[in-house]
Amino acid sequence: MSTILEIKNLNLGFNLSDGFRQAVWDVSFSLERGETLAIVGESGCGKTVSTMSILQLLPETAKIQSGEICFDGENLLNLSQKQMQKIRGKRIALIPQDPMTSLNPLYTIGNQLLEVIELHQGLKGKEAFDVALNALEKVKIPDAKEKMSAYPHEFSGGMKQRVIIAMALACHAEVIIADEPTTALDVTVQAQIMEILREIKKQENLSVILITHDLGIVAQNADKVAVMYAGRIVEYAPVKELFKNPKHPYTKALLNVILDINTEKVETIDGQPPSIENNISGCPFHPRCAQCMEICVKKNPPKRTIDGSVVCCHLYD
Ligand code: SF4
């Protein structure tokens, strides 16, 4: 396998009314061709903002302080907006969380597909139509030809998400960023969408960044996992190692968040992740960590490599 995407030491933050606040700290990860990397963590841990920086789809208040985002050997941070437009949607596609708001309600599914095919592939007429139809068939839209002239409101949430995946396929995207792609869908539809993603990933040798808080989806789909907390990657490991031998107390706590069918209670992690406005000394997880030690309050743990996993925790000093 060869590396298609590599984030190196990314630091970014936001200009807020009371000054600049750092939101992403020294984030590094890589994605090989044909691989799925899952990024997990609670809401507000920096998963989405880290990955949106790849596409440079950040709010105006955001500022990347340092780091590199290397895609196919090129640092995307050195590209102009015009150059980025040739990569965004074409070579790196986004499957957003909410398919309901991702399609334009005023245009048919076919028009929207044909528009991206024309823009990114330079195809027109029958050639473009055939590519669109083929993509809809690959994502298993029934009666795909007729559905080309349907409007988004005629599609269910799951079908809309299939159309978004078809857009990425039609443009021959090499990397797909799927940002909680099934959160807005019901459970059976979630399973169908994940199956389609797995199938097309295999067929097209796609690389996928899967942002999720569902560890079941991670176990089924990912090759490796980055666990994020307070804007940092606190554990980065092959998926089997992470589930078999989790090292960071936050990873262990996430794995314990399950429903106990005997008591019908859900184990939770006490407390909340810190907001970017709060400066926490030492390890950012220390206020919630059952294994917190004196050093944890004073010093942020460095990255260490243990049994093929990268972990930030003083337990391994
Ligand atoms: Fe817990 Fe300390 Fe490890 Fe942080 S560094 S996760 S507080 S043991």
Image (cartoon, rainbow, N blue to C red):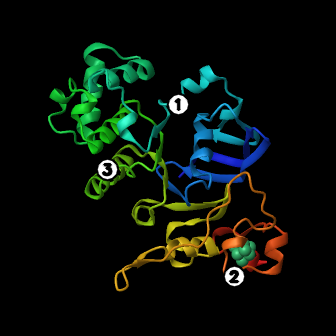
N-term-proximal mark, 1 vs 3: 1
N-term-proximal mark, 2 vs 3: 3
Residue drawn at (81%, 64%) of the image: 281
CA gap, disc 1 to disc 2?
43 Å
Residue on which the image places disc 2: 291
Dot 2 amino acid type: Gln
Residue on which the image places disc 3: 193
Residue 82 appears at what percent x and percent y?
60, 20
CA gap, disc 1 to disc 3?
22 Å
* 2 or 3: mark nearer the eye: 2
Left or right, 171 with reference to 56:
left
Q: Quadrant of residue 237?
A: bottom right
Residue toward you, 21 or 10: 21
Residue toward you, 239 or 258: 258
Total marks shown come to: 3
132 relative to 257, above or below: above
Left or right, 126 with reference to 309:
left
What secondary structure is found at the residue carrying circle 2? loop
What secondary structure is found at the residue carrying circle 3? helix
Residue 276 appears at what percent x and percent y?
71, 52
Dot 3 amino acid type: Ile
Residue 112 appears at what percent x and percent y?
34, 23
Residue 228 appears at what percent x and percent y?
62, 59
Q: Residues within 10 Å of mark 3 (few under 14, many from 20)?
A: many
* 1 or 2: mark nearer the eye: 2
Residue drawn at (28%, 31%) of the image: 152
Dot 1 amino acid type: Arg
Residue drawn at (58%, 40%) of the image: 52
